[in-house]
Image (cartoon, grey):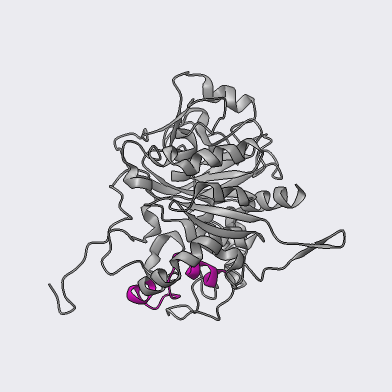
Amino acid sequence: MGRSGPRRERRRSGGRPGRDGDGLSGRARAGRPGGPVGAGSHRWGGAVQRAAGDPLRGAAGTGDAPAARGARALAARLAGGDGGRGPDAAGTARRRHHAGLERRGAATGGGPAAGAALERTRGRVVSPPRVAVIQFPGVNCEAESARALERVGLIPELFRWTRPASELRGYQAYLLPGGFSYQDRVRAGALAAKEPLVEVLAEEASRGKPVLGICNGAQVLVEAGLVPGGGGVELALARNHMPERSGYYARWVYTRVEPSACVFTRTLAAGTLLPLPVAHGEGRFASREPARLEALLRAGQVPLRYAKADGAPADAFPDNPNGAAAAAAAVCDARGTVLALMPHPERAVDLGAMSRDTTGTWAEAREAALRSGSADAPGPGLTLFAGLARHLKEA
């Protein structure tokens, strides 16, 4: 015990070590005394590593928030926080606005999303599409995901598991973010997949509405049978297969775009490399049928594969960080509107957030952006959200 009192252990949001693996977000809500950390606080840690001048973090080296606008104001409302002024104030704000946020969310909250630029189509004003960011207990990447959606002109709204499932039908798309839903009990994503929300989600997906599941969200989609969508549960996201180690693994990897009708990637040329971070303990796409993933690859349902820096398919660890069959980093349904994605694109929406260890054209773009003071320039992860935005605006 020091002068400042007893040291408190930093814990993840109700999770156990070495499971889903979104612990890099650093926002230990459930296990942290004093309530949740305010949105935009530097204590969020590794999930959102931004350069000076980023509107989500404010001035470099300070906790000061800019004017209540842009992505940070949205993230603060989603988290129920006070813009980074401390956990106690954040908890008070969360309790005060909880009901209103759940009913109205960002779309009518009077902030940047509500005041987002409207588009004029054939003489009528059209509001940007609304995307439900579904939060189960233990999820901890919702604010970063919301920021990415807003960056591409969409309106994100936090949709908690406590809301009536039928209210999901009012959205144009859905995102299941990373985290440790229900502490990853039984299997990662298994309990959340049984929620009534997911039943409604499946109904809306069958109508062609896009659904993106990231990391733990991907595990939920696989456990629910929405991916690959042939009826029933066909795949699993099993424990990582790694030489001389097991459990949680986090690093930046290369993913390669494959020919696919997937709405999130179809604007990208086949062979395009996207460096993205992974952080999970159960991320290995597997099936009881040994050739199932290869068949899905041929059918265009594996839109992203792990790759080497030169673009060749990853055939071994660490390029393939979990031993996934067919080096699958993502699997979609046959229509291409439901995507289960293990890497975290929301952690790579800015060039300045990229790892210094990456090489190639994205690394060159990162260095140029840092030299010019534009670290917020669009990064590789933003391309997937841009694909969603384009699809929704063309629909």
Q: Nearer the viewer, residue 317 or 165?
A: 165
Residue drawn at x 51%, y 47% as measured from the top left: 165
Q: Quadrant of residue 13?
A: bottom left
Q: Nearer the viewer, residue 168 or 174?
A: 168
Residue drawn at x 43%, y 75% as measured from the top left: 82
Is residue 180 visible to us here? yes
In the image, 387: left or right of 352?
right
Residue drawn at x 42%, y 72% as measured from the top left: 96
* Above or below 93: residue 183: above
Is residue 384 visible to us here? no
The verdict on residue 76 being magenta is yes
In the image, 349: left or right of 190?
right
Q: Dividing the image into 4 quarters, which one contains the N terminus? A: bottom left
The verdict on residue 263 being magenta is no
* Above or below 206: residue 295: above
| Residue 378: % across, % down | 62, 60
| Residue 99: % across, % down | 46, 65
In the image, 139: left or right of 268?
left
Q: Residue furthest left?
A: 1
Which region of the structure is painted magenta? Answer: 71-90
Q: Quadrant of residue 74?
A: bottom right
| Residue 279: % across, % down | 41, 47
Overall secondary structure of the magenta stretch?
A: helix
Residue drawn at x 64%, y 39% as measured from the top left: 337
| Residue 63: % across, % down | 42, 78
Total marks placed: 0
